[in-house]
Image: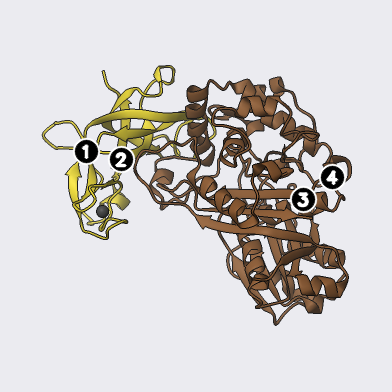
Chain colours: A brown, B yellow
């Protein structure tokens, strides 16, 4: 397999843009990424486009008016992991030698057409969805169990939102840029116990893109890319039997494969963008990704380790909690952040001397499955 | 009448006959599991073959009660269900975990509590009339 590098990235700000269709957002991200890579758009040989809600052939609608037609375009729907799935396909296309330079794109508009005040639910042909289950409650049940098992408090969980808002206040691409206190987090409107509104990621629109190429191509361009050391995508196991919901099995499995592929361990990782859709999620991923022991998440965050200036900075762009989660776009936007950080271009939120980054995404509510799909990538410079 | 009972009557829909049985003789309702005769695993809801062995599954009656593994109280929920409402996962002795709404006063909810299957209203129309009946869990007295 060949070495694979990211040589250009770009994204739109994340926020609520009901009047900007997903393809408009996608075009902005593609143009930015191609310009950042400083390549001729005609050199892009394929495009992998993550999107969940738009329906048929969204990638063609992104590329068609950019003069990037005729090439292979693959549309990718894989729930919350659609963006990282697009990246994984781009990786495979380069690593295998199929192509020399391709793009991974994620684009999504969730606000155009959706009524707020209702929680995102599993599909209505899904038995738990029919009986009233919603995403915040699925994570809420994990949180209740975790809190009971390890004595974590609502204040402990709120720290994740406080930290991620602190980070996002430094990120001009974030939807929320305000600072919040523990008291404000806990006093916000109750969504699904134990989560208040500020502990749930907001809906958002946005797009991100990355130009991915082989080492040979990169050298030929004279570019200095960010290497993809691991690219893993797995699906959830179907299981009706009782299991420990405080150990997200799919994430454990995907991250072990990623560490093995990169020949690294948690100790080597400077920053992590994880699937912090709810505050409890960051706690579970500190532990499951191997950054602290089971039950130690509260002391891990209280030590400052996960915060800008700490040893393993989590959600430095503000995470899903402050960026929002435009489903198809998130995985590619995590890639953009990793690349900016590793190139030292992250402005006020730069992690000094960052050399390694992990991005993790998981999700998709399917009854009987931990999550539908989970992606993990590791990048180095 | 028309032969299309769910369209022109106001009777709530019963969900779902191969998961849940409410005996007409007044006996307590129960859930149905689907057991693999090769590996012994029990599945819920209904499957035709075992996902692991691809062996045909045998319908069994699940225990009427289980233990509440975890729960949440939903304050911003789905349309058609009056918020706040409690939901939870219940672990049955047959080694199967089942999600449902909880007909339990919220202040009485406790992880690990014993709960049993009942029939209840799981969805309402916009005038708050019941439109769907199904299984729920209540506290064992
Ligand atoms: Zn079997």
Cα gap from disc 2 to disc 4, whole angstroms: 49 Å
Q: Which numbered disc, 1 or 4, marks the residue closer to the eye?
A: 4
Kindly identify which numbered label has been placed on residue B96. Answer: 2
**Upstream in the sequence, badge 1 or badge 2?**
1
Residue at label 3? A337
Q: Secondary structure at mark 2?
A: strand
In three-dimensional space, the C-alpha distance between marks 1 and 2, rounded to whole angstroms, equals 9 Å
Q: Circle 4 — which element?
A: loop
B101 sits left or right of A56 in the view: left
2 vs 4, front mark? 4
Whether residues under marks 4 and 3 lie with C-beta atoms below 8 angstroms apart, the answer is no
| Res A302 visible | yes
Q: Which residue corresponds to mark 1?
A: B62
The secondary element bearing badge 1 is classed as loop
Assign a secondary structure to mark 3: helix
Residue B31's spot in the image, x, y percent? 24, 39
Q: Are marks 1 and 3 in contact (CB under 8 Å)?
A: no
The residue that appears at 59% across and 58% down in the rendered structure is A232
From this viewpoint, which residue is outermost toward the bottom?
Answer: A70
Taking the spot 66% from the left edge, 66% from the top edge, the residue there is: A91
Q: Please, which chain is the residue tagged with disc 3 on?
A: A
Q: Report if the CB atoms under discs 1 and 4 are less than 8 Å apart.
A: no
Task: From the image, tell me which residue sits under label 4.
Answer: A353
Please tell me whether mark 1 or mark 2 is closer to you in this view. 2
Q: Position of residue A258 (x, y in %)?
A: 60, 53
- Do discs 3 and 2 belong to a common subunit? no
């Amino acid at each position: 397999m060949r070495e694979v590098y990211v040589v250009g990235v770009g994204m739109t700000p994340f926020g609520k843009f009901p009047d900007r269709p997903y393809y408009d957002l996608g075009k902005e991200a593609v143009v930015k990424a191609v310009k950042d890579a400083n390549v001729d758009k005609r050199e892009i040989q394929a495009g992998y486009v993550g999107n969940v809600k738009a329906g048929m052939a969204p990638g063609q609608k992104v590329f068609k008016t950019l003069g990037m037609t005729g090439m292979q375009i693959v549309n990718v729907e894989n729930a919350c992991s659609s963006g990282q799935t697009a990246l994984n396909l781009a990786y495979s296309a380069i690593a295998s030698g199929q192509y020399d330079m391709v793009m991974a794109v994620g684009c999504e508009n969730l606000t155009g057409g959706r009524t707020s005040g209702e929680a995102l639910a599993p599909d209505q042909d899904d038995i738990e969805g029919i009986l009233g289950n919603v995403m915040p409650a699925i994570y809420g049940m994990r949180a209740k169990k975790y809190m009971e098992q390890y004595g974590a408090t609502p204040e402990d969980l709120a720290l994740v939102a406080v930290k991620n808002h602190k980070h996002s206040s430094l990120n001009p691409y974030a939807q929320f840029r305000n600072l919040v206190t523990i008291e404000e987090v806990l006093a916000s409107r109750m969504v699904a116990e134990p989560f208040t509104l500020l502990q749930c990621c907001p809906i958002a629109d946005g797009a991100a893109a990355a130009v991915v190429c082989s080492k040979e191509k990169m050298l030929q361009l004279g570019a200095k890319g960010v290497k993809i050391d691991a690219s893993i995508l797995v699906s959830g196991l179907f299981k009706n039997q009782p299991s420990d919901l405080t150990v997200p099995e799919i994430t454990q499995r995907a991250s072990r494969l990623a560490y093995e592929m990169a020949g690294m361990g948690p100790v080597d990782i400077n920053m992590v963008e994880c699937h912090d859709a709810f505050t409890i999620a960051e706690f579970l991923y500190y532990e499951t990704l191997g950054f602290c022991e089971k039950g130690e998440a509260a002391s891990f965050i209280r030590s400052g380790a996960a915060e800008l200036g700490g040893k393993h900075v989590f959600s430095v762009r503000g995470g899903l909690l402050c960026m929002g989660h435009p489903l198809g776009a998130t995985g590619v936007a995590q890639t953009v952040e990793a690349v900016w950080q590793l190139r030292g271009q992250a402005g006020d939120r730069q992690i000094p001397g960052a050399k390694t980054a992990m991005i993790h995404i998981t999700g998709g509510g399917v009854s009987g499955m931990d999550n539908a799909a989970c992606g993990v990538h590791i990048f180095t410079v | 009448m028309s032969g299309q009972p769910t369209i022109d009557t106001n009777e709530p829909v019963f969900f779902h006959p191969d998961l849940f049985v409410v005996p007409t003789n007044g006996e307590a309702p129960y859930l149905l599991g689907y057991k693999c005769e090769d590996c012994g695993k029990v599945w819920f809801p209904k499957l035709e073959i075992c996902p692991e062995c691809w062996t045909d599954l045998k319908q069994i009656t699940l225990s009427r009660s289980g233990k509440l593994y975890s729960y949440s109280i939903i304050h911003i929920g789905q349309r058609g269900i009056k918020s706040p409402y409690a939901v939870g996962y219940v672990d049955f002795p047959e080694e199967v975990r089942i999600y449902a709404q909880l007909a339990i006063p919220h202040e009485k909810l406790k992880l690990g509590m014993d709960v049993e299957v009942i029939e209840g209203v799981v969805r309402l129309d916009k005038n708050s009339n019941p439109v769907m009946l199904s299984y729920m869990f209540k506290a064992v007295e």
